[in-house]
Image: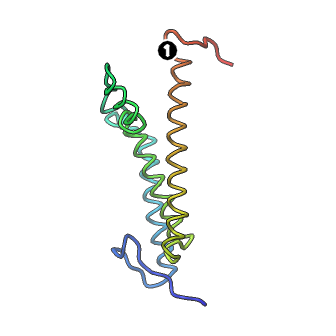
């Protein structure tokens, strides 16, 4: 019934001698990713605080282009980095600590891809609604002029 777990991460690039070493190795990787997030959150580099592209104006194709690319391209690069690092951490927690690596591929896909889809959908909804709420409160012709 018991079987040996795979003792490598990063598709075999980093190998361990025991399960304990593997747990510490994954913990070290997750700690490094979290430290990067914390440092970026504290210092907020100026080069990552401005969007790299501005929305296009005019015409049907410009409108299509803006709708398709707005959730990612017009986002601040710092926010995109935070989102990607969070997804990487969630993936490794599921993959190694929840032992998804040792399951059949169909179960892995069902669990991992469902979670990835739902996370991406949540991020899209939060960014879209957050942008709308920001515009309602903070433009010159704002609909709401007071705080609650």
The C terminus is located in which quarter?
A: top right
Taking the image as shown, residue 50 lies to the left or right of residue 22, namely left
Count every numbered label the image shows and give the total. Answer: 1
Q: Along the line of sight, which residue is nearer the eye, 116 or 6? A: 116
Label 1's element?
Answer: loop
Taking the image as shown, residue 68 lies to the left or right of residue 133, namely left
Residue farthest right in this picture: 148
How crowded pointer 1 is (Cα within 10 Å; few <14, some 14-19, many 20+) is rated as few
Taking the image as shown, residue 2 lies to the left or right of residue 58, namely right
Residue farthest bottom in this picture: 1
Q: Along the line of sight, which residue is nearer the eye, 111 or 19? A: 111
Q: Residue at x 54, y 37 (%)?
A: 126
- Residue 67 location, quadrant: top left
Q: Residue at x 54, y 73 (%)?
A: 99
Q: Residue at x 50, y 54 (%)?
A: 116
- Residue 56 location, quadrant: top left
Residue farthest top in this picture: 141
For residue 1, above or below residue 116: below
For residue 12, above or below residue 62: below
The N terminus is located in which quarter?
A: bottom right
Chosen colour scheme: rainbow
Q: Residue at x 51, y 81 (%)?
A: 19
For residue 35, above or below residue 79: below
Residue farthest front in this picture: 60
Residue 43: x, y in percent?
41, 39
Residue 103: x, y in percent?
53, 76
Q: Which residue is mark 1?
A: 139
């Amino acid at each position: 019934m018991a079987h040996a777990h795979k003792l490598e991460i990063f598709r075999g690039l980093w190998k361990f001698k025991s399960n304990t070493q593997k747990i510490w190795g994954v913990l070290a990787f997750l700690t490094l990713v979290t430290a990067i997030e914390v440092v970026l959150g504290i210092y907020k580099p100026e080069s990552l605080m401005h969007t790299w592209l501005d929305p296009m104006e005019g015409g049907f194709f410009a409108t299509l282009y803006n709708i398709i690319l707005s959730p990612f391209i017009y986002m601040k690069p710092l926010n995109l980095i935070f989102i990607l690092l969070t997804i990487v951490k969630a993936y490794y927690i599921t993959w190694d600590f929840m032992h998804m690596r040792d399951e059949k591929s169909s179960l892995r896909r069902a669990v991992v891809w469902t979670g990835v889809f739902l996370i991406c959908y949540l991020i899209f909804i939060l960014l879209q609604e957050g942008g709308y709420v920001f515009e309602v409160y903070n433009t010159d012709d704002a609909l709401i002029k007071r705080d609650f």
